[in-house]
Image (cartoon, grey):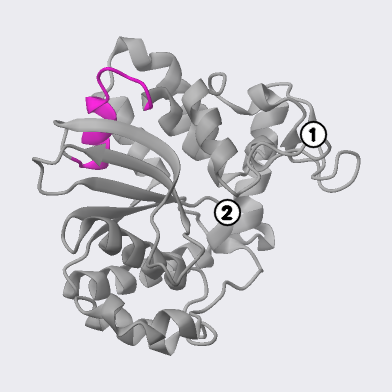
Amino acid sequence: MLCGMDGHTYIKQRQILWARRRGIKLIGSAGDRGVKAYAEQLEANLFQPLSTKARACYEQGDGNELGNGCMPGKLQAVHSSAAIATNVFDRWLCAKDPRSMLRALGLPTTSVSGIDFECKFPISPRHRRAPNIDVVIHYGTDTPQAAVAIECKFTEAYGNRRHGGMKQGYLDGSDLWTSLPSLHDLASRLYPNDNEFKHLHPAQLIKHVLGLNASFGPGKYRLVYLWYDVPTPDGDVHRQELMRFAELARKDGVAFHHMTWQDLILCLAKLSGDADRDYVDYLADRYL
């Protein structure tokens, strides 16, 4: 284990060192207080200025990504999953030709109708709160899968804070689980607390599946889990938990796959042209 580090500390320290190399001024989560891991200026934490479309998406979300004027937003944190998602995907939100990104993700490259951040897919009228999905790629109605939903993780899987289990309200709706017997069995074991998974947050992924099922129908979407691999024991456990969840999803016919940010960036480097060189070099310098 690297100097006793866990995965969360490993990622955070690497990002702080990246900011120092770039001469980026860092502040705490409360300005003068807290660990200095937030860029004082949002733009310093991003490859390119936040696009108008991305800003609108974050303003409509409920994750406080942009801050409140007094405290820095999550997008300013160098170790933020929103920041890595923005740095990787914002370039493609309005791109005329996102094929290199789609190929790197192993996704269809035709009939793309749009890309959005912070999308909500309600589970049912009795569930008022719809979980946010970080990135969604929309496809035309003539395609087998109408959407690809991407859950983006960075440090979250390796933190000390325990993730929540399933609430009874989700388990009561038998109509939600008709096509999902394996995930329903898992959800039942996650009530009221998750005592099976240490790093993966399966309850969150199950809620995404329920919302996507309700919006598109079984088999009409794909759920992708992007995560950051770390050379520490918790990285190995996280991977094993992902493989376990993926097998349960496969049994229920859910198109689910996971990929590391490192693999995605390396694929982008291989597939991108000269026009994307600065973008790929930025991602490689910062996240590899």
- Magenta stretch bounds: 93-107
Location of residue 16 with respect to 235 vertically, above or below: above
Dot 2: element: loop
Tell me if residue 61 is in the magenta stretch: no
Answer with the quarter of the image where residue 41 lies. top right
**Residue 242: x and y, percent?**
36, 67
Farthest residue in the top direction? 275
**Residue 176: x and y, percent?**
30, 76
Q: Residues within 10 Å of mark 2 (few under 14, many from 20)?
A: some
Q: Residue at x 29, y 63 (%)?
A: 214
Between 233 and 147, which is closer to the camera in this rendering?
147
Amino acid type indicated by mark 1: Gly
Between 1 and 244, which is closer to the camera in this rendering?
244
Amino acid type indicated by mark 2: Thr
Dot 1: element: loop
146 with respect to 269 (left or right): left
**Residue 218: x and y, percent?**
18, 64
Number of the label disc, if any, that sits on residue 155: 2
Tell me if residue 100 is in the magenta stretch: yes
Which residue matches tag 1? Answer: 69
Farthest residue in the front direction? 125
Location of residue 248 with respect to 135 vertically, above or below: below
Answer with the quarter of the image where residue 83 lies. top right
Q: Residues within 10 Å of mark 1 (few under 14, many from 20)?
A: few
Q: Earlier in the sequence, mark 1 or mark 2?
A: 1
Between 77 and 254, which is closer to the camera in this rendering?
254
Q: Are marks 1 and 2 in contact (CB under 8 Å)?
A: no
245 with respect to 166 (left or right): left
135 with respect to 234 (left or right): left
240 with respect to 22 (left or right): left
Marks 1 and 2, how far apart at CA = 25 Å
